[in-house]
Amino acid sequence: MGRIQAQVLSIVLVAILAMWILIRTKSIQFSYNLEMIRSGLKFGLPLIPHNVGSMILFITDRVIINRFMGLSEVGVYSVAFQLCGAMTLIASSFNLAYAP
């Protein structure tokens, strides 16, 4: 738990330092346009249920495997799922690049 807390703390501190430097050097300026915010919310808010549904689909298989097979099998499945996801990304990239 201490390792996780240290990583989170270091990420937060570096983010605060980076934002402070960017604001101080005027590399970033905060402004808002109410019409653009409305447009972004109009586009993005309907996508929230879609993303929640996707998360439920990704989590459900692990819950079922944990219920019937155990936590160690969930770990094996999760590792295999991540490796297959990386291989799928590479294969689909090549396919999209070379397919007519």
Image (cartoon, rainbow, N blue to C red):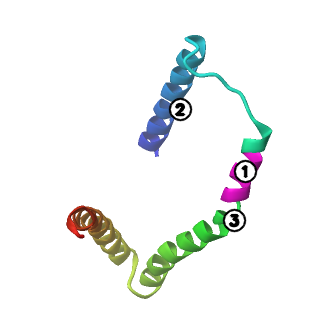
- How many angstroms separate mark 1 from mark 2 (CA)? 30 Å
Question: Circle 1 sits in a helix, a strand or a loop, which is it?
Answer: helix
Disc 1 marks a residue whose amino acid type is Ser
Residue positioned 58% across, 22% down in the render: 28
Q: Earlier in the sequence, mark 3 or mark 2?
A: 2
Which quarter shows the C terminus? Answer: bottom left
The residue indicated by pointer 3 is 46
What numbered label is drawn on residue 64? none
Residue 38 in magenta stretch: yes
- How many angstroms separate mark 3 from mark 2 (CA)? 30 Å
- How many angstroms separate mark 1 from mark 3 (CA)? 12 Å
Task: Please say if 61 is above or below 54.
Answer: below
Asked if the residue under mark 3 is in contact with the one under mark 1, i.e. CB atoms within 8 Å, the reply is: no
Task: Please say if 30 is above or below 40.
Answer: above
Residue at the far bottom: name it. 68
Rendering quarter of residue 35: top right
Residue positioned 42% across, 82% down in the render: 65
Q: Position of residue 85 (x, y in %)?
A: 32, 67
The residue indicated by pointer 1 is 39
Residue at the far front: name it. 100
Residue 62 in magenta stretch: no
Residue positioned 51% across, 79% down in the render: 60
